[in-house]
Image (spheres, coloured by chain):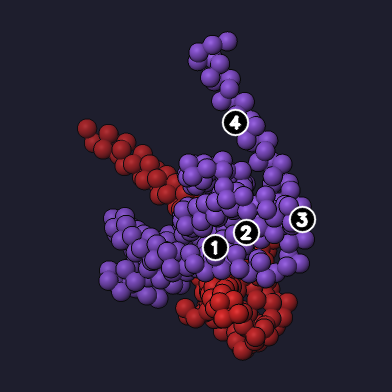
Chain colours: A red, B purple
Amino acid sequence: MRQSRTIDISTGLFVLLGFAAILFLVTQITNREFSLRSESYRVQAQFENVGGLKPGAPVSMAGVTIGRVEAIGYDMNLYKAIVTLRIDSSYDQIPNDSDASILTAGLLGGQYIGISPGGSDQPFRDGDKVEFVQDAIVLENLISKYLFSQAGSREESAPAPAPTE
Amino acid sequence: MTGLPAELAASLARFLERLGGMTRFSGRVLLQSPVALLRPRLVVEQVYNTGALSLVIIMTCGLFVGMVLGLQGHDLLQRFGSEDALGTGAALSLLKELGPVVTALLFAGRAGTALASELGLMRATDQLSAMEVMAVDPMRRVVVPRFLGGVIAMPLLTAIFIAVALYGVQLIGVQFLGVDQGQFWSQMRGAVELDDVMEGLIKGVAFGVACSLIAVFEGYNAQPTAEGVGRATTRTVVISAVVTLVLDYILTALML
C-alpha cells in the first residue's frame, strides 16, 4: 500500500510537471494573451500592400501596444487589403483622422501597425475606417527605384560632357 | 539457389515476416487499448515506470541541450549582429525538431529498453505462458498498459524537455552572454505561434506511439533465452532511433 502511494505521488508530480510545461509553452512563448479584459472596438484600414503583416501583430501608438491585428482580408472591388484592427476600449480617445502605417520592428523583427494621432476632436468609434494609411515598404521596390534613379542620372550626366569636347 | 542470393532472399523473407508480425501486433494492441483503460491502476503504474523514472535524465539532458544551443546560437547570430533573435531561433528549433526527437531517442534508451527487457525476461521465464494458463490475457494485463503508459508519458516528457531546454538557453544567452532579456522573450513571443507548440506535441505523441510499440513488440516476441533478451533490447533502441528519424521527416513534410 505504501509502495503504491509513492508511485501515485510521483506519477501525479510527473503529470503535473508535464502539464505545467505545456501551459508554459502555450502561454509564455507564444503571443497568445489570455486577458480577461476583452472589451475592445474594431477599426478597419485599407492598404495597397500589407507586406508581411500577420493577424495577431501588435497595433501600437508611440510604441505602446494598444491592440492587435484581428484579420487581414482582400477586397476584390477596391483591389486593396482590408485590415481589421482590434483596439482595447481603454484607448477610446484616438482622433478619427489619425493615420495608420505598417512598420517593421528592427531589421529582422516582425511588422506591426503604428498609429500616429491626428488633430480631430472626434475619436474613433467601433466600425470606423482609417482614412490616412501608409503601406508597408517593400524592399525590392525601394531598391529598384534607387537603381533606376541612379541609371537615369547617369544617362543625363553622361552625354553632358560630350558637346564641350 | 545457393550463396548470396539465397541469403538475401532469406533475410528479405525474415524482414517481411517481422513487418507483418509487427502490423498484426499493432492492430491487437490498438484494439485492446480502450479495454485496458478500464483498469487505470495498471496504466498509472506504467506512466510512473516510463515517465516519472525518466524525468531526471530528460531534465538533465534538456538543460545541457539548451545550454549548448545558447552557446552555438549566440556564436552564429553574433556574426550577423542579431543576437536578440536567439530566443526565436532556439524556441522554434526546440519546439519543432530538437525537443521531440531528442526526447524520443532518450525515451527509447531509458524506457524502451526497460520495457523490452522486462517483457523479454517475462517471456524467457515463462511468466507470459503462465498467465495464459491462468486464463489471463497477457496482452491486456501486461503489454497494453505498458504501451499506453509510454504513449501518455512521451508528450509530457517532450514538453518538460523543451521547457527545461529553454531555461538552459536563457541561462547561457541572457545570464552569461548578455543578450537583452526583454528582446529575448518578446521576439520569441512575436515569432512563435500556437501551431508550433502543437507541432511539437503532435510529434511527441507520434514518437511515443512508435517507440512504445516497438519496445513492447520486441520484448513480447523475444527469443526466450538470455541472448534473445539482449538482442531484443538492442533491436528496440536501433529500430526506435531509425523509425523516430524517418517519422520525423514525414511529419515535418506533412506539417510544414
Number of the label disc, if any, that sits on residue B135: 3
Give the mark toward the camera: 1 or 3.
Answer: 3
Label 4, label 1: how far apart the Cα atoms are: 28 Å
* The quadrant where residue A67 appears: bottom right
Q: Which residue is mark 4?
A: B15
Residues at marks 1 and 2 touching, judged by CB atoms closer than 8 Å: yes
Number of the label disc, if any, that sits on residue B176: none
SS of the residue under disc 3: loop
For the residue marked with disc 2, what is the amino acid?
A: Arg
Number of the label disc, if any, that sits on residue B50: 1
| Crowding at mark 2 (Cα within 10 Å: few <14, some 14-19, many 20+) | many
For the residue marked with disc 1, what is the amino acid?
A: Thr
Q: Are marks 1 and 2 on the same chain?
A: yes
In this rendering, is residue B125 above or below A11?
Answer: above
Query: Residue A133 location, x and y as percent?
Result: 58, 68
Chain of the residue displaying label 1: B
Give the mark toward the camera: 3 or 2.
Answer: 3
| Circle nearer the N terminus (2, 4) | 4
Number of the label disc, if any, that sits on residue B146: 2
| Circle nearer the N terminus (3, 2) | 3
SS of the residue under disc 2: helix
For the residue marked with disc 4, what is the amino acid?
A: Phe
Residues at marks 2 and 4 touching, judged by CB atoms closer than 8 Å: no
Query: Residue B137 location, x and y as percent?
Result: 74, 54
| Circle nearer the N terminus (1, 2) | 1
Using residue B75 as the reference point, say whether residue A5 is left or right of it. right
Q: Are marks 4 and 1 on the same chain?
A: yes
Using residue A142 as the reference point, say whether residue B249 is left or right of it. right
Chain of the residue displaying label 3: B
Label 1, label 2: how far apart the Cα atoms are: 8 Å
Label 2, label 4: how far apart the Cα atoms are: 25 Å
